[in-house]
Amino acid sequence: MQQNRLFEELTGKVSALLAQSPAKDVEKNVRALLASFFGKLDLVTREEFDVQARLLARSREQLSALESRVAELEARASKPNP
């Protein structure tokens, strides 16, 4: 029992020391630095990217349909009228 209590006490003290150590501040500062760096890169969110990808796919489909329609109209126009 004494060993368990000693181990728990030691673990608690180590955890308290780590929470107060400079390592915690370093982690916080690195996160802030990375957030600032990525903020300057003009990145988009995944959601915004997915929306734009869907819009592009739809535009491509419409363009393909219009190209087919123009080709059809050009074929009709080049046929001689009886």
Image (cartoon, rainbow, N blue to C red):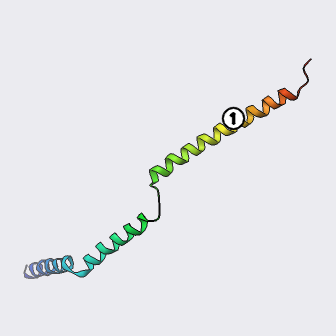
**In the figure, is residue 44 to the left or right of 64?**
left
Extreme-top residue of the structure: 82
How many residues crowd around disc 1 within 10 Å: few (fewer than 14), some, or many (20 or more)? few
Q: Quadrant of residue 1?
A: bottom left
| Residue drawn at the location 42% of the way across and 66% of the way down | 38
Pick the residue in front: 5 or 13.
13
State the image coordinates of residue 19 (x, y, percent, origin top left).
20, 76
Quadrant of the drawing holding the C terminus: top right
Q: Is residue 5 above or below residue 72?
A: below
**In the figure, is residue 29 to the left or right of 16?**
right
Extreme-left residue of the structure: 2
Q: Quadrant of residue 71?
A: top right
Amino acid type shown at disc 1: Ala
| Residue drawn at the location 14% of the way across and 77% of the way down | 12
**In the figure, is residue 76 to the left or right of 37?**
right
State the image coordinates of residue 2 (x, y, percent, origin top left).
7, 81
Mark 1 element type: helix
Q: Is residue 68 above or below residue 80?
A: below
| Number of marks present in the image shown | 1
State the image coordinates of residue 40 (x, y, percent, origin top left).
44, 65
Which residue is identified by label 1? Answer: 65
State the image coordinates of residue 5 (x, y, percent, origin top left).
9, 78
| Residue drawn at the location 50% of the way across and 51% of the way down | 49
| Residue drawn at the location 34% of the way across and 74% of the way down | 30
Pick the residue in front: 27 or 33.
33
Q: Is residue 38 above or below residue 51?
A: below
